[in-house]
Structures are given as C-alpha cells and as structure tokens.
C-alpha cells in the first residue's frame, strides 16, 4: 500500500495485483500473461515469498516467466531463489568470503545435540525471526519436529542489538538499529528500531551481500562481535514501514523512482 500511495503522488499508473488473480495461458505456441499483458504493464515489483505453498511456488515461477517475457522485475527470480532458504543464502555468502557466523546446516537432530552450546537454532526455511531459539545448554534444546531442517549458528553479537540495512540498486537507502532483550531483534517479534548511520565499510558489506545473491532490493541484517561485522540474513522482500518511520527516508518513493529509471528494461 505504501508503494501505491507514492505512485499516486508521483503520477505513476500503478496497480496492486495478487498472484492468485493472475493466469498463464499457453495456446498454439503463444504465451499470454493475463492481467499483466492485458494492462500494458512492463515493470513489476514482485513479492512472492510468504509461507511455503503451491501459490508461492507458482508466484516464483511466474516471476521467472515475467523476466523471460521482457518485464523488468524487482526482485529477479535468481534473487528469490538465492534467498529461498538459509542453506542457499549462507553457502553463497560463504563462497564469496563474506563474513557469516560459523554455521552447521542439517536435518539431523543427532548432529544438533552433539553441538556444544551456546548456539542459535533457526529453521532453514523461515523469516521474521520465527522459530529462532537461543540454546544455552543441551537441556534447553526445544522439541524438534520430524522432517525439519535447521541452522545451528554460533552467537555473533556482543550486545542486545543488530542493524537492518536496506539496499536498493547497489546502494544503501537507510539503516536502523534493532534492539531487543529477546534472542531475536526483529521488529515483528517485539524489537524496537531507531535510525542508524552506517559507515563506508558496513555499507559496502551490505551492498556486497545483496549483490552476491542477485537481489536488487534487500534487507541485510548485520551484527557485531569483538569489533567484527557478521551477516546474519538477507531478506529479498523486507518490510520497510518501520525503517521509514525511524529514519524519515521515503523507501517506497525510492523504489518507484528506481523502477521508473529502468526505461526499456
């Protein structure tokens, strides 16, 4: 809705479309995208990633097809696939020598119980801090669901805060400091946010993290331990109203302007 508000202010024709209202028609060698082709749309801000479901998988596939049909799409399909779960995300960041906390990714409950605490336990597929636990002793390991898969991750935070950096088109838009007395600092989990000015080194790290995962727009979570920065997560469709409120940066307008700048793409 923020994007819609800013589009109206800028005089940009913009519409909100649910993926569940779209359709892909295939007939006699012709591909037709209902809603998009019908309305003359050429640029799409895509947000397909919610809870894992057939509709979400359909939305990811449609995002790829939109790109192949010549639409300019944010984020691109590759960006969503690189951040679909933490296993792919952390592996890509690690291969590019970007700093992440020491991590073990496994479906093996035995491997988890053999890991000396303390450590954070996260579902491999998840967002907004849901399901994240701080395990301080083996007795506090929660009951794990069968057929699950987890990230076992070394703590990489000195105090009770980290930062969320919004990156758009290879530059930092804004950043907030997220503070919480809970193990997770996500605003959706009760954390509080305030404006934070990132220095050149941290800004460069956030941009590299976003670029390495092929994201045009991303929320990069960064923590600090013993003066060293660590990338905790990269979200390809971050909520940004809290950032706007804390910093005064009009993120929605910046996204619209970025889309408009891509003439003919």
Image (cartoon, rainbow, N blue to C red):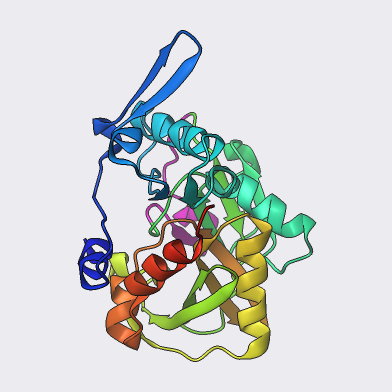
Q: Nearer the viewer, residue 18 or 257?
A: 257
Q: Nearer the viewer, residue 2 or 42?
A: 42
Q: Is residue 265 left or right of residue 103?
A: left
Q: From where the camera sits, is residue 230 visible? A: no
Q: Is residue 107 left or right of residue 19?
A: right
Classify 27 as above or below 70.
Answer: above
Residue drawn at x 38%, y 35% is: 56
Assign the magenta stretch its main secondary structure. loop
Q: Nearer the viewer, residue 160 or 232?
A: 232
Residue drawn at x 51%, y 65% is: 136
Residue 8: x percent and y percent? 20, 66
Q: Which residues are magenta?
A: 130-146
Residue drawn at x 43%, y 84% is: 177
Q: Quadrant of residue 103?
A: bottom right
Q: Is residue 79 left or right of residue 38?
A: right
Residue 107: x percent and y percent? 58, 36
Seen as rendered, the residue at the extreme top is 28
Magenta segment: does it hold 237? no
Residue drawn at x 40%, y 73% is: 254
Q: Quadrant of residue 194?
A: bottom left
Residue 102: x percent and y percent? 70, 62
Quadrant of the snapshot with the N terminus? bottom left
Q: Quadrant of residue 259?
A: bottom left
Q: From where the camera sits, is residue 142 visible? A: yes
Q: Is residue 254 left or right of residue 72?
A: left
Classify 66 as above or below 117.
Answer: above
Residue 65: x percent and y percent? 50, 32
Q: Nearer the viewer, residue 118 or 70?
A: 70
Magenta segment: does it hold 138? yes
């Amino acid at each position: 809705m923020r994007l819609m508000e800013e589009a109206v202010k800028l005089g940009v024709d913009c519409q909100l479309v649910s993926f569940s209202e779209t359709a892909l028609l295939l007939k006699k060698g012709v591909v037709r995208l209902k809603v998009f082709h019908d309305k003359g749309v050429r640029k799409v801000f895509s947000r397909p990633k919610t809870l894992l479901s057939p509709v979400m998988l359909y939305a990811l596939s449609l995002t790829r097809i939109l790109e192949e049909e010549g639409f300019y799409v944010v984020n691109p399909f590759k960006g969503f696939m690189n951040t679909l779960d933490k296993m792919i995300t952390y592996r890509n960041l690690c291969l590019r020598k970007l700093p992440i906390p020491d991590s073990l990714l496994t479906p093996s409950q035995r491997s988890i119980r053999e890991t000396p605490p303390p450590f954070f336990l996260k579902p491999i597929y998840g967002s907004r801090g849901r399901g994240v636990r701080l395990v301080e002793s083996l007795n506090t390991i929660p009951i794990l669901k069968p057929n699950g898969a987890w990230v076992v991750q070394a703590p990489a935070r000195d105090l009770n805060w980290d930062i969320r950096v919004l990156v758009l088109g290879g530059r930092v838009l804004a950043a907030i400091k997220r503070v919480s007395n809970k193990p997770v600092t996500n605003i959706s989990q009760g954390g509080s946010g305030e404006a934070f000015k990132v220095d050149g080194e941290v800004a460069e790290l956030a941009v590299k993290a976003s670029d390495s995962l092929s994201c045009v727009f991303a929320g990069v979570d960064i923590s600090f331990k013993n003066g060293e920065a660590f990338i905790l997560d990269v979200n390809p469709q971050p909520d940004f109203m809290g950032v706007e409120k804390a910093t005064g940066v009009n993120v929605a307008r910046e996204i619209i302007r970025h889309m408009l700048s891509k003439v003919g793409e």
